[in-house]
Image (cartoon, rainbow, N blue to C red):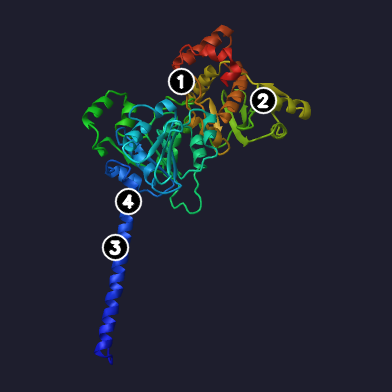
Amino acid sequence: MRGETEAQAELRRLAARERDATAEVARLLAQADAAAREDRRTRWVPHAPTTAQARFLGRTETEVLYGGAAGGGKTDALLMAALAYADVPGYAALLLRRTYSDLALPGAIMDRAGEWLRPTAARWSDKDKRWTFPSGATLTFGYMDQEADRYRYQGAELQFVGVDELTQMPERWYTYLLSRLRRKVGVEVPVRARSATNPGGVGHQWVKRRFVDEGGAGTFVPAKLADNPHLDAETYREALERLDETTKRQLLGGEWVSDGGGLVYRGFDAGRNVVRVAPECDEYVLGIDYGFRDETAFSLCGWRKYDGCVYVVEVQKFERMIPSDAAAVAREYEGRGNVGRIVGDVGGLGKGYAEEARSRWGIPIEAAEKVNKKGYVSLLNGALERGELKVVAGTTDELVAEWRELPWNEAGTKEADGFANHASDATLYGWRACLAFLEGERPKGRTAEEREEEIELAVAGDGWGEGRSEWEAEPDEAW
């Protein structure tokens, strides 16, 4: 610089070199710290992640799903994600399957964790099904097979929840687990929900909507058989080629396709069964499915002479509705006029609701027909397929959402536990009450035995076989 002495210039050069050296030291320290953190995150894992697994592990969103095709390394990816912060004091992770037997299978995620962690300093508690790490962090294994199982985790404080084979679980069980994600002040780890699954299973529809379809709440990271170099792909591919076409597309191609065969209301088609506006009906029937812990649902169905079609005009669902509030809603519907019948589930919990409506409000609620639910579900599906049952767009969305996702259980004997069915049941009550009118417009002369034969044929056509007598013997439990 002009006017400075040689000594001043030398001091300025030395200061610049010191600043550069300080910056370089800071950069190297940051690099070393990042490397140490990465080492801490991977030192419990015996092999490097595949490219697809690395994409999954690198996501920062709260909810991420990994999988698609079979053989993509889902179990390892999920376990790697759970172990990422095992060196952080206070870190708590939970990994679940639908049943304990699934969890404990050879090669399943709990067994895989044992293979990885037994040679390390982590310690296993068979009683608690938990690994504890030198840092004090924990990795616990659990299951959720029934509605009440979710309350096993009611007091949990978790930074990681992982679900293996998510499509085996209802959405509301999964979302309940999300409420367990939290961290104490000073615990510097992200809260994460990570899942892995193939397409198919009772939860196929909601998992696809939440993770795969555009605009869902979660992020999907796809993986295929070719993404996993640790598997004998050719032998596995040969086994998958023997499957039916839909399952093969799901497991081999990772495609989120469904043939609808597992849905209870598989006859619904938006193009055929949805109308913008319903015609003015001659009479309406209000179907009610009562609930307190679950929703109470109201479904207003209408019919008109010589039409041959039932119109579901409006459906509403309310949570934690007490009997007097339910009666007030029924009275409001009754006041609209032309509501000829009100039918509801008056057994069990519904008995108190119906008595409140009858005795204090003067509302004539009739007992809904509940014998042979499966047979009448099949007949309703037939009405949907023939276009003889229509729903109004915008006012029946909660019903349509249930119809699109409500599955049979794995055995095909009843609706799967944990899925919403209250709008569907209320509509089935109302639609079934309309059948007397619809039958009056069709050719006369059928005997009761012929009517039963029609239901039997409908049941047989859906592949339900001899399951009908069980539902008829215990109608309340069947619903």
Where disc 2 sits, the SS reads: helix
Position of residue 222 measured from the top left corner of the image (x, y, whole percent): 33, 40
User: Which residue is at the far bottom?
Assistant: 3
Q: CA distance from mark 2 to mark 1?
A: 26 Å
Q: Mark 4 Cα within 10 Å, few/some/many (few <14, many 20+)? A: few
Where disc 3 sits, the SS reads: helix
User: Which of the image's four quarters has the N terminus?
Assistant: bottom left
Q: Mark 1 Cα within 10 Å, few/some/many (few <14, many 20+)? A: some
Q: Nearer the viewer, mark 1 or mark 4?
A: 4
Query: What amino acid type is highlighted by mark number 4?
Result: Glu
Q: Residue at x 57, y 36 (%)?
A: 277
Q: Disc 3 vs disc 4: Cβ atoms closer than 8 Å?
A: no
Q: CA distance from mark 2 to mark 3?
A: 69 Å
| Residue position for label 3 | 28
The numbered disc on residue 350 is 2
The numbered disc on residue 412 is 1
Q: Nearer the viewer, mark 3 or mark 1?
A: 3
Q: Mark 2 Cα within 10 Å, few/some/many (few <14, many 20+)? A: many
N-terminal of the pair, mark 4 or mark 2, is 4
Query: What amino acid type is highlighted by mark number 3?
Result: Leu
Instruction: Indicate the quadrant where residue 261 lies.
Output: top left
N-terminal of the pair, mark 3 or mark 1, is 3
Position of residue 213 measured from the top left corner of the image (x, y, whole percent): 41, 41
| Residue position for label 4 | 38
Where disc 1 sits, the SS reads: loop
Query: What amino acid type is highlighted by mark number 1?
Result: Gly
Q: CA distance from mark 4 to mark 2?
A: 57 Å
Side of 23 relative to 421 (left or right): left
N-terminal of the pair, mark 2 or mark 3, is 3
